[in-house]
Amino acid sequence: MNAPDPAGTILQLAGGYCVPRSLHVVADLGVADALDETPRTAAELARDVGADGDALGRVLRLLAAHGVFEARDGKFAHSPASRLLRTDHPRSMRGLARMFGLPVNWKVFGEMDHAIRTGRPATEEVVPNGFWSYFAEHPDANAIFNAAMEGKAHGQCAAVVAAYDFSRFRSIADVGGGRGHLLRAVLGQARFATGVLFDLPQVVAEAGASERMTLRGGDFFRDPLPACDAYLVMEVIHDWDDERSSEILRAIRKAAPPDTTLLLIEQIVPADPGPHWSKMLDVHMLTLLGGRQRTAAEYEALLRQSGFALDRVVDTGAGISILEAKPV
């Protein structure tokens, strides 16, 4: 195996931001939706999406070099990755790509040095009222964010339900559960259980209650949580630093019956020093929210200081793990 070229490594990293930006723009334009099973030229695609043919062709050539689309004899065809950018794909990632490309995210990352120098989110320099307030005030950006979370949830929720037996629980709370995608999937498996979806009032208002799922609007930093057999907390803790995360977990501990089960569902940073998406996501959390991705050991310590003991970690096989904990 050839040794890596140090200068080439720096060059690719220093100038490589054009690759994700190309993906964001192509996702915004809906290029993947304009391409079916027949390879098409860049000019043909550009006419459909309102772009310049030469410019789009150069961008698609770059993306194809990274596995998104395939370049074939002067035309472009779908690759497995580019199919995920189609809106009609059952596990579409178009919304996720568009969300990462939102102008506010690029503005915040332009101030990333603030996060590195202070340990505080760079969002403070761009949107002083906070990331979530920004989305509340910008409905178009909020719609893209919601589409991203919904698309991501489809694959992850299926993996979580397949990896864990929820049937022993009779009441399940989903804390910070958004519009209830995970809780609905869990209740589909645990057919004798009822569920409580807990999130901010304006969030749960979009979820829609059902016979077995009730809605409770509130703030988990201030309002009491429901008492249930099990608590789902999916990709909530990574939004916060250790102090605030512990406040959330202690609030659950205060509401929980003695024999409850806490299920933290998060991406775990592996011990392996090589590349891993969780390490990139960790820097997103640092820069945008002041949160963090954690190792299994860091989660165990956080749980212990919040009144829980980690029993086991279940790998769902979808890049996300279930950390099962009990009160102590």
Image (cartoon, rainbow, N blue to C red):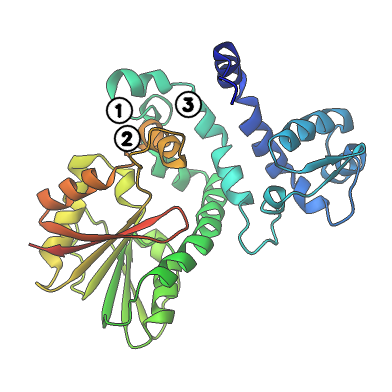
Residue 201 bears which disc, if any? none
Name the residue located 21 percent from the left edge and 41 percent from the top edge: 242
- Marks 3 and 2 sit apart, C-alpha to C-alpha, by 13 Å
SS category of the residue bearing label 3: helix
Q: Note whether 124 is above or below 83 in the view shown.
A: above
Q: Note whether 116 is above or below 229 in the view shown.
A: above
- Marks 2 and 1 sit apart, C-alpha to C-alpha, by 6 Å
Residue 109 bears which disc, if any? 3
**Is 268 placed left or right of 102 in the picture?**
left
Q: Could you tell me if residue 298 is visible in this image?
A: yes
Q: Note whether 83 is above or below 263 in the view shown.
A: above
- Marks 3 and 1 sit apart, C-alpha to C-alpha, by 13 Å
Location of residue 73 (image quadrant):
top right
In which quadrant is the N terminus drawn? top right
**Residue denoted by label 2:** 290
Q: Nearer the viewer, residue 126 or 153?
A: 153
Name the residue located 58 percent from the left edge and 15 percent from the top edge: 5
Q: Are marks 3 and 2 in contact (CB under 8 Å)?
A: no
Q: Nearer the viewer, residue 48 or 94?
A: 94
Q: Nearer the viewer, residue 9 or 92?
A: 9
Query: Is the residue marked by circle 1 packed among few (<14), some (14-19), or many (20+) residues within 10 Å?
Result: some
Amino acid on which disc 2 is placed: Gly
Q: Earlier in the sequence, mark 2 or mark 1?
A: 1
Q: Are marks 3 and 1 in contact (CB under 8 Å)?
A: no
Q: Earlier in the sequence, mark 3 or mark 1?
A: 3
Residue 120 bears which disc, if any? 1
Amino acid on which disc 1 is placed: Arg
Name the residue located 64 percent from the left edge and 64 percent from the top edge: 90
Amino acid on which disc 3 is placed: Phe
**Is 122 placed left or right of 303 in the picture?**
right
